[in-house]
Amino acid sequence: MATIKESVDLFEDEIIAREYHAVDRQYFPLLSSRAEGRIAITNRRVIGRSEVKVLGGKRVEFNAVPLDKVQGTCLAVGHYTSVRLLIVGIIVAVSGVSLLPFARWPGAIMLIAGLLAIVFAFRREVQIGIRAAGIVQGGFISKAESKGYLLLRFAGFAAFRVHGPDVDAVMRALDAVILAVQQRGAEIIKDLKCPNPGCSYMTMIDDQPPKHCPECGKAWRSK
Ligand SMILES: [Zn+2]
């Protein structure tokens, strides 16, 4: 999947301070979907974008919240169990076993289906949202009430990887990066940009600036 920088039209003065690759999952036909999700913090917005490919086609989702409305983050990454699927799986498997002496094939098929349901009851998920205030959604009254906005969510079987390479960094630092850009946005962005005015190379907020720009070779200003 393309990065947010490549796939989203940014405002003229908008600069990405940090982009995270939070979800990255391979495609296994019939069993799973291909999923990729990214989060970006710019000096104007917090953006979530995901692409999910399943057997029937593709779905792209885009969420964004203005940076000045963001009040906090709500993040969840890890395992959970679908109790309903687990119970159904156990019932089907037990029924399959008790059917075996009378009807071998139907019993065996039920047993396998039940065991598969039990395996797939254990799931993993990544859920990244933010709390924001005062955004009006087609209403008449703007209430300065906190509200949660989901930027990215993906769940899948625990047997497959759901996490992207940057999910730990998201859990550790998303809140701090948003706060830093909110408070010192202009200053931070000046430090991220290549000192050569004709070059558009940018480093990320939590990266060490390079000694020399990898695009134009100009020596980076020392802090
Ligand atoms: Zn440069």
Image: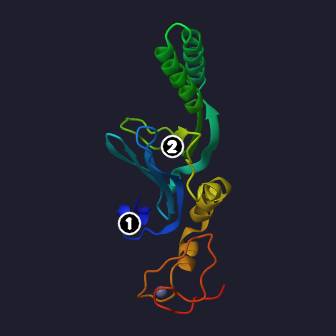
Residue located beneath label 1 in the image? 6
Q: Residue 106: horizontal and vertical position, in percent?
A: 47, 15
User: Residue at coordinates 51% horizontally, 43% vertically from top-left?
Assistant: 153
Q: Residue 175: horizontal and vertical position, in percent?
A: 63, 55
Instruction: Tell me the quarter of the image containing the N terminus.
Output: bottom left
Circle 1: element type: helix
**From this viewpoint, is residue 65 visible?**
no
Alpha carbon of mark 1 to alpha carbon of mark 2: how far?
Answer: 21 Å
The figure's colour scheme reads: rainbow
Circle 2: element type: strand
In the image, farthest residue toward the bottom: 218
- Asked whether 215 or 179 is in front, the reply is 215
Q: Residue 159: horizontal and vertical position, in percent?
A: 58, 41
Residue located beneath label 2 in the image? 153
Instruction: Tell me the quarter of the image containing the C terminus.
Output: bottom right
Q: What is the quadrant of residue 87 in the picture?
A: top right
